[in-house]
Image (spheres, helix red, strand yellow):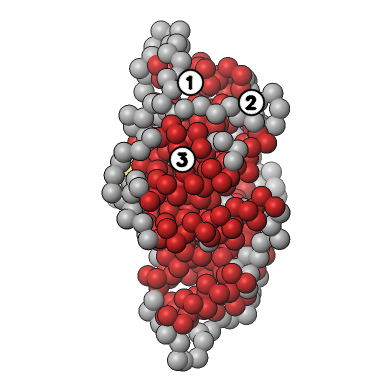
Amino acid sequence: MEHQTQNWVKVAELSEVPEGQPKAIQMGKGRSIALFNVDGRIYATDNQCPHMGYPLTRGTVRNGILTCDWHRRSFDLEGGGCFHVECDDLRTFPVEVRGSEIWIEPGDLTYRRAEEHKQLLREGLLSEDRWTMSKAISLLLKGGVPEEEVMGTILAHVSRHIASSHGAEGGSDVSRLINGLKVGRRYSGADRLIAVTTAACSASGPASERLEVVPLPEPVAWEKISRWVRNFSYEGQSGRIERCLFTAYHKGDADKLCPLLFECAVEPHFIDLPHIPLYVSYLSEVIDAFGWESASELFFYLGAQLVGHRPDEPERYRRDAIGLMRQMLPTVENAALEQTLEFDEDAFVAALTSVNIQRAFEAVQSVLVDGVKLERLITTVVLLAADRMASTPVNVDAGWENLTTELNLAASLRSAQQIGGNKVAAKGLFHIVWQIFANRWINIPSRALSQPLSQEKLDVPNQAEGIKHIIGTIQTLNVQEVGVQVLGYLNAGYCAERLLEEIGHTVLWDDTGSQILPTLRTVFEEWKHAEGHPAQYQLLVGLARYVTDIRTNKENRSAATTAMRFAEGRTTIEVFEG
């Protein structure tokens, strides 16, 4: 390009574009224009095929039709219209030949295709095509569409997808959706894209129409609705709860619905169903992030499925635990909670890991009656779960699904307390303690959280080399060594947050990324809560062992990276040759 006048730009000499020999012209960073000489007339188009980004200068032109040489998408060379419904139209540019020079008018490059690309995202979600989703998300973000708006499009799909294709298990989709958003905000560029795309993939699948829900006829006061929901929850009548929630919302009682679900989720009969309170926590975060207008359908349906789930008949130990919890609840509900930070944490942990459910529950009852602050107790159970992850034997089944559930459920009690109140969080502690008892088969040695960890330091010259060393250990799946290395890194005084970011980066690009998102998010957030505690390092040690042991080393880099380059205007060839 030599110079320009007004909006017209000189792009080439006429002699540079002989008939039948297209030419690619670079215009600014990441933008490629294709010039074609057909029957003596010059045409100009984007060089990037709107389908998959292949350079159109490698295509063919016949009868005024430009055909991409990769997937055979065809376009009107003059107007850019695509003859295939599953492909965007091609952008074309006005051309003038001024003597021996070719000039084009690039026009206004302001992004105006948000609705088209939202539709592309919806199509990718329906078809479960990762490339289409990555491409649409990347184009939307590159065009300046706020991430919350992009996630809102995904949420609209997941609401109908879950409501027409899932029951309570749809909570796992919501988990990946909200945790993908939370983790993604900590990153930029390709890392952020892969987090959002991972969330989108979790939400993909069929989404059918369903019967319209309408409010119950009057008179229905909130007191009556809340009583019905509690009764239906106890009876496992999920189908009856959805209309109750819907009615309360339309009567103006939306602010009371999340606390009500939390109250139901921590009742004794759900004690062996940790996903119920955990998914209720994530569902409440969806409302907080997107608002009722966008998330109401998902909340009414999934909330009803969760708290209306009918548990199996309890076996002996669970039956005993339910009975014990019911006996203790009156003293807990009447206790003066939140009075002191002081308690014997080691004795409390010893009781929780004693493999004696009565002793464990009595320890919970005791600290609650004593008025130990819930924030302090939540930190203790979070760190106990992390310590168990850092200590679990890995030469047999390490129990990662169970242990990460312990960790994430413990962390979710912060939301339970904030939204449902102290009594809800107090009841939730019994659920955590039951999980520790139920996971006794993992056979993790009990350890006092105040007990000093190894003081050995990682033998590396600097922080960057330490991170490189640990990431290499994760990538080679050396779970036996990674925990020791992370602890040694932290003992050397290197930055924990920097290592956590790099572990997250490594995790996001692996096929196990969607599985790890909730735990990665928990460790990010709980690190600050645990500051100054002797067991704080176990959060990072446990995470590193977990991600190493379940890693597949099958990367998602191709779809996300290619989509980003596509959004930048680069052709597929440039992506792979760059």
Q: Viewer-proximal residue, 564 or 327?
A: 327
| Amino acid type of the residue tagged 1 in the rendering | Val
Q: Is residue 296 visible?
A: yes
Q: Is residue 332 above or below residue 403?
A: below
Q: Are marks 2 and 1 in contact (CB under 8 Å)?
A: no
| Percent position of residue 421, x then y | 37, 59
For marks 2 and 3 on the same chain, the one whose residue lies earlier in the sequence: 3
The residue to which callout 2 is attached is 393
Q: Which quarter of the rendered picture does the N terminus lie within?
A: top left
493 vs 67, left or right, is left
| Amino acid type of the residue tagged 3 in the rendering | Val
Q: Viewer-proximal residue, 81 or 140?
A: 140
Q: How would you rate the neighbour count of disc 3 (Cα within 10 Å): few for under 14, some for 14-19, many for 20 or more?
A: many
Q: CA distance from mark 2 to mark 3?
A: 20 Å
Q: How would you rate the neighbour count of disc 1 (Cα within 10 Å): few for under 14, some for 14-19, many for 20 or more?
A: many
The residue to which callout 3 is attached is 381
Q: Is residue 2 visible?
A: no
The residue to which callout 1 is attached is 486
Q: Viewer-proximal residue, 554 or 96?
A: 554
For marks 3 and 1 on the same chain, the one whose residue lies earlier in the sequence: 3
For marks 2 and 1 on the same chain, the one whose residue lies earlier in the sequence: 2
